Image (spheres, rainbow, N blue to C red):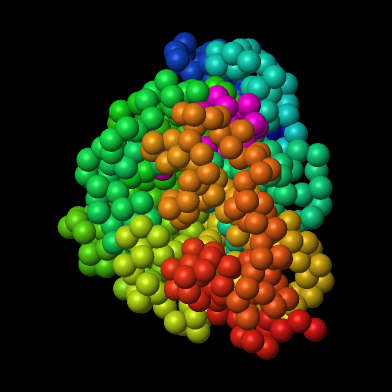
Amino acid sequence: MPPRIWIDADGCPNEIKLVAFRASHRLGLAAFLVANVPLAADGWPRVTTVCVSHAFNAADDHIAENAAAGDVVVTADIPLAARVVERGSVAISPRGEVYDESNVGHHLATRNLMQDLRAAGAIQGGPAPIRPGDKARFAAALDRTLTKLLKGAPPRTPRCGARPDPSELLDPSRMEGYNARRRAGGCLAETLVIGCTKLLCGTATIADLMRADAGQRPHLLQFTTEDRPLVVWNTTRRCNLACAHCYLDARDRAGRDELTTDEARSFIADIAAMRCPVLLFSGGEPLQRPDVFDLGRFAIQQGLRAVLSSNGTLITPEVARQIADVGFSYVGVSIDGTAATHDELRRKKGALDAALTGIQNCLAAGVKAGIRFTLNRRNAADLDAVLDLVETHGVPRFCLYHLVYAGRGREMVNDDLEPADTRRIIEHLLDRTKDWHRRGIATEVLTTDNHADGILIEQRLAAEAPGRLADVRELLARHGGCSAGTKMANVDARGNVHPCQFWSHVTLGNVRQRPFSAIWTDQTNGLLAMLRRKAEHLKGPRCSCCRYNALCGGCRIRAEVVHGDPWADDPACFLTDQEIRRA
């Protein structure tokens, strides 16, 4: 059953309650605010207030008697935490401390000792007050806990007066899929990627994939075989930064002839009718499009899962609250190294501090946020520092992007690493991934834009965990390598449709003249036909003969820029000739 959220209102700060309310709204979960005085939760239709008697411990007793296995209880009261953990619930303090069966006994013993010392006069004062960083830690802990509990949870009928969102009444057939995706939890930072944590650490299996609704579960979207694409929409060309590797060559001004609000709504309704799983609001900087929140809300009402790709610098606490209120599932923020490196690549002093603040504001508002890191010569030495930052700040997702030579990225061809250096870095990233998993750090690690990474994981498992090798090979086969023209589509700010965001020089059609659904399913389009059967068209002496070309296919844009032919070898492949040779 999906978890419910129980909030012990006594001693729970209002800002912590709001984080829990937003999580309830975003994930479609019932929440209960329990106190011995009447409280209001106006504007939060999934939150039910429960007023108990003034009897001693009445609120604690109500929660302990009603919280079930798999529920989450927000409380600063450790004895209550111990009671609900015994029933199979998970307790989280307003400071972000997670209490479960492995540690609650220790916390209870420490609490009792401190009470005895205070009673004896050995120590003075009570617990320290809530600090600003505690709110972010609580939001991150709640998000990680709910994500873990939601994976695989079947729907539960709302109880105790929990009411559906008014938006769910718009179109029952369409909202049924939306509600299923909300109940499934997790997040969609970067789909159609190599899920290092999932593959290397065994957190996704063929058994998971075989469930009837696997195509709707966010944590398995990297592995589904459906051709309804994830759509990246460049909402605007305008951006407040001028990053060196921007694939769009965005500027600090709006482009001419961008889709109007009405045109955007028609496009969104069309891809929703196609049952595309995700709409990624990108840019430029999407937060510089004035109607982005209205369009995000419309997309979610239509049944799409909406995520944001941002540079993070414009995400103030108020903007983060708006993102949460709209219901965006995830915000991916680009971080390219330490302050000196990041600010140089972003071409703006203070950009790193502003981006990190944006991430913390998202987490504090209950919005899952993650870091995207584009690997190149200028920042390779900073990778460990960024991973340390991810761990320190409790960021739930990290995705490494390999450099693709598009937009201003074409100017950085010589800044790409040598393939052997890239391989060493990916090997190191896999080591960090395993270390995090071993230590119980819930951050998910992914890579994208070089599918040789998946082959490297397969090779590791052949040596370290051969019993899982068949599962991983099947998952990689279902992933299918480069997704351009198949599971990935791009629509630019003017409505032009491209095979992916890096193919901006090739237009398949325009949504102003023809619906996206008609463009994407046009079987007479020669390029789409070739991209959907890539292995048959590869020409390079390595890619065409590679034993893994059905699992990878290489990056066709890198091949085109370096060799002048999109079907030539991917120059960034780090596998050796011996490794790719067919048996």
Side of 559 where 186 appears, left or right: right
Q: Position of residue 115 (x, y in %)?
A: 45, 44
Question: Is residue 164 visible in the rendered structure shown here?
Answer: no
Please identify the quadrant where the C terminus is shown: bottom right
Residue 442 painted magenta: no
Q: Position of residue 294 (x, y in %)?
A: 40, 23
Side of 515 where 455 appears, left or right: right
Please identify the quadrant where the N terminus is shown: top right
Q: Is residue 373 above or below residue 268?
A: below
Q: Indicate the quadrant where residue 79 lies.
A: top right
Residue 271 painted magenta: yes
Q: Indicate the quadrant where residue 377 lies.
A: bottom left
Residue situated furthest left in the rendering: 349
Q: Is residue 124 above or below residue 153?
A: below
Q: Is residue 566 above or below residue 251?
A: below
Q: Indicate the quadrant where residue 389 lies.
A: bottom left
Residue at the image point whose x is 76% and y is 38% from the top? 213
Side of 200 where 58 appears, left or right: left
Side of 194 where 209 appears, left or right: right
Q: Position of residue 18 (x, y in %)?
A: 42, 28
Question: Foreground residue, 506 or 226?
Answer: 506
Question: Foreground residue, 298 or 83?
Answer: 298
Question: Is residue 213 visible in the rendered structure shown here?
Answer: yes
Q: How many marks?
A: 0
Q: Position of residue 144 (x, y in %)?
A: 55, 46
Residue at the image point whose x is 42% and y is 78% from the top? 417
Question: Foreground residue, 195 or 112?
Answer: 195
Residue at the image point whose x is 52% and y is 69% from the top? 565
Residue at the image point whose x is 17% and y is 57% from the top? 349
Give the magenta part as a residue range.
Answer: 267-282
